Image (spheres, helix red, strand yellow):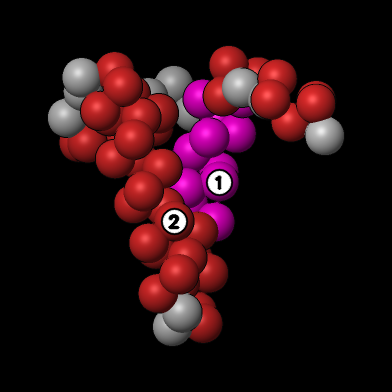
C-alpha cells in the first residue's frame, strides 16, 4: 500500500490523460451513468485549480499536437 502514495500524474503523458478524460465522457454518453462524467469533471477541475488554468485552456493544451 505504500506505493500508492508514490502515484503521480507526472507519469501520465498528455495523450494518456486526454484518453482517460475522453473515455470517461464516452462511457457516460453510452451508459447514462453520471458517475463517469462527474469523475471526469473532478479530475479536470482539480488539475485546473492546481495549475491555475481555465478548463478550456487545459483541454486545448491536451488536444494540441495529438
Q: Give percent across and percent down for residue 25.
A: 43, 61
Say whether disc 1 or disc 2 marks the residue closer to the N-terminus. Answer: 1
Q: Nearer the viewer, mark 1 or mark 2?
A: 2
Magenta-drawn stretch contains 19: yes
Relative vertical location of residue 28 with respect to residue 11 in this rendering, above or below: below
Q: Nearer the viewer, residue 59 or 40?
A: 40
Q: Residues within 10 Å of mark 2 (few under 14, many from 20)?
A: some
x and y percentages locating residue 62 in the rendered image:
40, 28
20 relative to 37 in the view: left or right: right
Residue placed most toward the observer, 52 or 28? 52
Crowd tier of the residue under label 1, counting other residues whose Cα lies within 10 Å: few below 14, some 14–19, many 20 or above: some
x 41%, y 42%: residue: 43
Q: Which residues are magenta?
A: 12-23
Q: Secondary structure at mark 1?
A: helix
Which residue occupies 54% across, 56% down? 23
Q: Left or right of 29: which side holds 44? A: left
- Residue highlighted by disc 1: 20
Q: From this view, report whether residue 58 is shown above or below residue 33.
A: above
The reply to whether dot 1 and dot 2 touch (C-beta < 8 Å) is no
User: Does residue 44 belong to the magenta stretch?
Assistant: no
On the image, the x and y values in percent for residue 60 come to 28, 30
Q: Which residue is mark 2?
A: 39
User: In this orientation, which residue lies closer to the viewer: 35 or 22?
Assistant: 35
Q: Residue at x 29, y 40 (%)?
A: 45
Q: Is residue 26 above or below residue 61?
A: below
Amino acid at each position: 500500500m505504500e506505493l500508492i502514495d508514490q502515484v503521480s500524474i507526472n507519469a501520465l503523458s498528455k495523450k494518456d490523460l486526454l484518453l482517460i478524460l475522453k473515455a470517461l465522457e464516452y462511457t457516460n454518453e453510452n451508459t447514462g451513468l453520471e458517475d463517469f462524467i462527474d469523475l471526469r469533471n473532478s479530475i479536470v477541475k482539480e488539475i485546473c485549480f492546481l495549475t491555475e488554468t481555465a478548463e478550456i485552456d487545459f483541454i486545448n493544451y491536451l488536444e494540441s499536437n495529438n
